[in-house]
Image (cartoon, grey):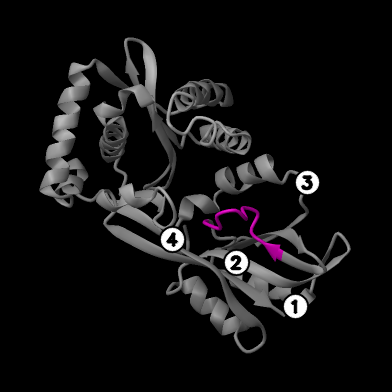
Amino acid sequence: MQTPQPDPFCALTAWQLSFRDAMDPSRPYIVRHNEDGLVQLALHALGKTAVLGPIERLWLFGCNVLGAAGPELLEQLVDEIPVVSDRRCTRFAVSGIDPEGILARELRKRFEGRCEVSLLHEDAQGAASLGGGVDGFLSRRSASFRRNLRNSDRRARSAGIQFERHCPATPDEADAIFKRMVVVEQKSWKAGIGMDGQFSLAFYAAMLRRLSASRDGRVVLATRDGEDVGFIFGGMIGAIYRGQQFSFDEALRDLSLGNLLQREMIVWLCEQGAERYDLGPLLGPFMDYKAAWAELAFPMECWVLSV
């Protein structure tokens, strides 16, 4: 948190190392750190070319050069031209960069003119301010949005929908809550292609387990007559909440449980003094729904430094 980032949660070990557990447990990596900075890079071999890049290499959300001393640590590493698993590494990827931020300025200052700096990937994270609490959040939504949410709430309450809040404090608690979430996922339209896929099961289970160490996981479950019918979960970093997944029983689609789960999480976050709700990427398929919830957008890029 020393350096503002587009997606700070995804720089955490809860994201980065959970990805490694699920996808790349044996992939070689390098970590350099001191009191004021950290650099973490994993080996990505592309034919005869070796690239050192972020551990989480699928979405490239989290930054892997952290803290005030991070750029200097990266420069020292680039100067060495490290050899990892018998591969000479001459390209270095840095993800989660705010293109107008402090890190971007430092990277340009240190590497432009001595390395080829190229853009590998760009995206934008959507976010909502929680300033002013629930009333403040709703004041920044349209009148039709507020009206539809009230009508959905009345229908769901009449149908017997209730909400539970969970903040797992041990790995066992995290595993028990996660199992309940997976049961709901298997009754959703995403069954078989969503959070219950092999990689996603391992990734999100490891994430919730890691978050239990600091009690930073947040899960809301929707129930009816004692049966789980919906969930939403994510994690905290300071006063910022980062949403991960939500789902609901397809048979109850008419109750708008997705919107109500979002609303219930926002109520809880505001009670706890959270300041921002990060909703993840705005670009790509199935992201259109975020436009109604997120009035903020934070560009993020991944750069490659070629020596």
User: Which of these two is toward me, 295 or 32?
Assistant: 295
Q: Residues within 10 Å of mark 2 (few under 14, many from 20)?
A: many
Question: What residue sits right under mark 3 in the picture?
Answer: 26
**Proximity of marks 3 and 1: CB atoms separated by less than 8 Å:** no
Disc 2 element: strand
3 or 2: tag closer to the N-terminus:
3
Specify start and end residues of the magenta stretch as a single range: 52-61
User: Which of these two is toward me, 43 or 32?
Assistant: 43
Disc 4 element: loop
Residue 209 at x, y = what percent?
A: 57, 32
Residue 164 at x, y = what percent?
A: 34, 22
Q: Residues within 10 Å of mark 4 (few under 14, many from 20)?
A: many
Estimate the spatial distance between the alpha carbons at disc 3 and disc 2, rounded to whole Å: 21 Å
Estimate the spatial distance between the alpha carbons at disc 3 and disc 1, rounded to whole Å: 26 Å
4 or 2: tag closer to the N-terminus:
4
Q: Which mark is residue 264?
A: none
In this view, 102 is above or below 258: below
Q: Which mark is residue 94?
A: 2
Residue 128 at x, y = what percent?
A: 29, 52
Question: What residue sits right under mark 4 in the picture?
Answer: 6
4 or 1: tag closer to the N-terminus:
4
Residue type at tag 2:
Val
2 or 1: tag closer to the N-terminus:
1
Q: Which mark is residue 79?
A: 1
Residue 208 at x, y = what percent?
A: 53, 34
Specify whether 218 is left or right of 175: left
- Camera-side mark, 4 or 1: 4
What residue do we see at 37% from left, 26% from top? 250
